[in-house]
Image: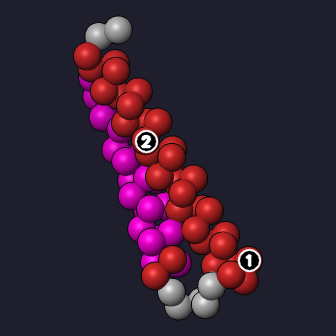
Amino acid sequence: MRGRTVHRSGTVVFSVLMVAIGVALIGQVIGGTGSVVSARLLLGVLFLAGGLARLYLEHKRGRRT
């Protein structure tokens, strides 16, 4: 594999993992194991937003090259 392909694949894999972690953290808070205003909810939202942003930017960058 070429270096650029490996980098892009790695970015997509880690971005999907970040989204999954964020959804899991948010799900735990909604499921009742944490208070509505908690660090777990904040981390879940940040992981979700970060993962989705990385996926969006990688998709956008892929169309240019």
Q: Nearer the viewer, residue 28 or 53?
A: 28
Instruction: Name the residue type under label 1.
Output: Gly
Left or right, 22 with reference to 30: left
Measuring from the top left, give residue 65's x and y in whole percent.
Answer: 27, 23
**Is residue 61 on the magenta stretch?**
yes
Measuring from the top left, give residue 38's x and y in whole percent.
Answer: 51, 86
Measuring from the top left, give residue 24's x and y in whole percent.
Answer: 62, 62
| Residue in the image at 37% along x and 48% along y | 54
The residues bearing labels 2 and 1 have C-alpha atoms spaced at a distance of 25 Å
The answer to whether residue 59 is seen in the rendering is: no
Q: Secondary structure at mark 2?
A: helix
The answer to whether residue 40 is seen in the rendering is: yes
Specify the quadrant that holds the N terminus.
top left
| Residue in the image at 34% along x and 21% along y | 6
| Residue in the image at 45% along x and 72% along y | 43
The magenta stretch is 41-65
Instruction: Name the residue type under label 2.
Output: Phe
Q: Which residue is mark 1?
A: 31
Q: Which residue is mark 2?
A: 14
Left or right, 29 with reference to 21: right
- Count neighbours of disc 2 (C-alpha within 10 A) and say few if under 14, some if 14 to 19, many if 20 or more: some
**Is residue 30 on the magenta stretch?**
no
